Image: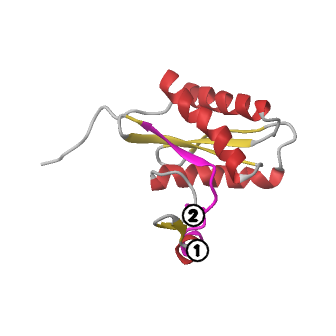
């Protein structure tokens, strides 16, 4: 017997645009131009924008953060052991899967009804600034 599932939530391009706009507004508020990527639940790029003045070197990093958050179903950041960074694990994962894992914060999954529908990745500031800019994008998901 074939088993299938139906009625999965999906992030649309329109939804991705709303998330990106919310993140851009926050970047403008803190006056740091950012590279912002939005991916679907499989980590495939839906939308990317490099704000005027954002670092070109952060383009690939923002996309990696979004992809990593979507595929790992969790915020990006280093592997932890309790409340301490597990440096060997964090670096080992990044080396083992460089296209799908980053120990750098700034990528957040987008979750609807307990299901990851995508992720947002932000880069060009500090890790705290990147995460700060990503959060309004996640919050905008509730309004989409």
Residue at point 77%, 48% (across, down)? 125
Q: Secondary structure at mark 2?
A: loop
Distance from the alpha carbon under mark 2 to that under mark 1: 7 Å
Looking at the image, residue 64 lies above or below residue 53: below
Q: Can you identify the residue that label 2 sits on?
A: 78
Task: Assess whether mark 1 and mark 2 are in contact (beta carbons under 8 angstroms).
Answer: yes
Residue 15 sits inside the magenta stretch: no
- Quadrant of the rendered structure where residue 29 is? top right
- Quadrant of the rendered structure where residue 53 is? top right
Q: Which residues are magenta?
A: 92-111
Q: Residues within 10 Å of mark 1 (few under 14, many from 20)?
A: some
Residue 95 sits inside the magenta stretch: yes
Q: Residues within 10 Å of mark 2 (few under 14, many from 20)?
A: many
Name the spot of residue 20 as percent of width and height, x first. 65, 32
Seen from the viewer's position, the closer of residues 49 and 137 is: 137
Seen from the viewer's position, the closer of residues 4 and 69 is: 69
Q: Can you identify the residue that label 1 sits on?
A: 87
Looking at the image, residue 18 lies above or below residue 128: above
Name the spot of residue 97 as percent of width and height, x first. 55, 68
Q: Is residue 25 left or right of residue 45?
A: right
């Amino acid at each position: 017997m074939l088993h299938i599932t139906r009625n999965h939530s999906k992030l649309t391009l329109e939804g991705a645009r709303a998330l990106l706009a919310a993140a851009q507004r926050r970047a403008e508020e803190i006056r740091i131009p950012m590279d912002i990527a939005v991916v679907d639940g499989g980590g495939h790029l839906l939308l990317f924008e490099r704000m005027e003045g954002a670092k070109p070197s952060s383009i690939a990093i923002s996309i990696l953060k979004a992809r990593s958050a979507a595929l790992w179903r969790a915020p990006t950041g280093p592997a932890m052991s309790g409340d301490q960074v597990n440096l060997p694990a964090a670096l080992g994962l990044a080396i083992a899967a460089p296209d799908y894992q980053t120990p750098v914060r700034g990528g957040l999954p987008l979750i609807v009804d307990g299901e990851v529908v995508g992720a947002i990745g932000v880069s060009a500031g500090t890790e705290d600034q990147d995460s700060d800019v990503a959060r309004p994008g996640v919050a905008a998901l509730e309004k989409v």
